[in-house]
Image: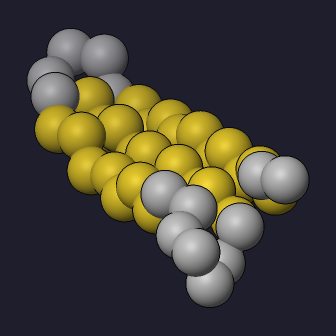
């Protein structure tokens, strides 16, 4: 299993919050999955 992701937090100049994740599985059961979350903080 492997996981890769990036997270951006809101700053004083950018109110956007973003979280992107990707997971992969190898072996007997193979697969790929992911998630995206975007928010505007005010």
Q: Quadrant of residue 1?
A: top left
> Quick check: 17 left or right of 6?
right
Give the residue drawn at x 26%, y 29%.
25
Give the residue drawn at x 62%, y 84%.
13
Task: Point out the residue furthest to the front here.
Answer: 12
Give the residue drawn at x 59%, y 40%.
35
- Residue 34 location, x and y as percent? 53, 41
Whether residue 26 is visible here, answered yes or no, is no
Q: Nearer the viewer, residue 30 or 18?
A: 18
- Residue 37 location, x and y as percent? 68, 45
Give the residue drawn at x 71%, y 67%.
15
- Residue 42 location, x and y as percent? 84, 53
Q: Nearer the viewer, residue 31 or 5?
A: 5
- Residue 22 location, x and y as percent? 41, 46
| Tag count | 0
Q: Quadrant of residue 24?
A: top left
Task: Point out the residue furthest to the bottom here.
Answer: 13
Whether residue 41 is visible here, answered yes or no, is yes
Q: Nearer the viewer, residue 31 or 38?
A: 38
Q: Is residue 13 placed above or below 15 in the rendered structure?
A: below
> Quick check: 5 left or right of 37?
left
């Amino acid at each position: 299993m492997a996981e890769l992701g990036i997270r951006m937090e809101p700053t004083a100049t950018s109110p956007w919050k973003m979280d992107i994740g990707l997971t992969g599985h190898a072996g007997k059961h193979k697969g790929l999955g992911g998630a995206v979350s975007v928010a505007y903080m005010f």
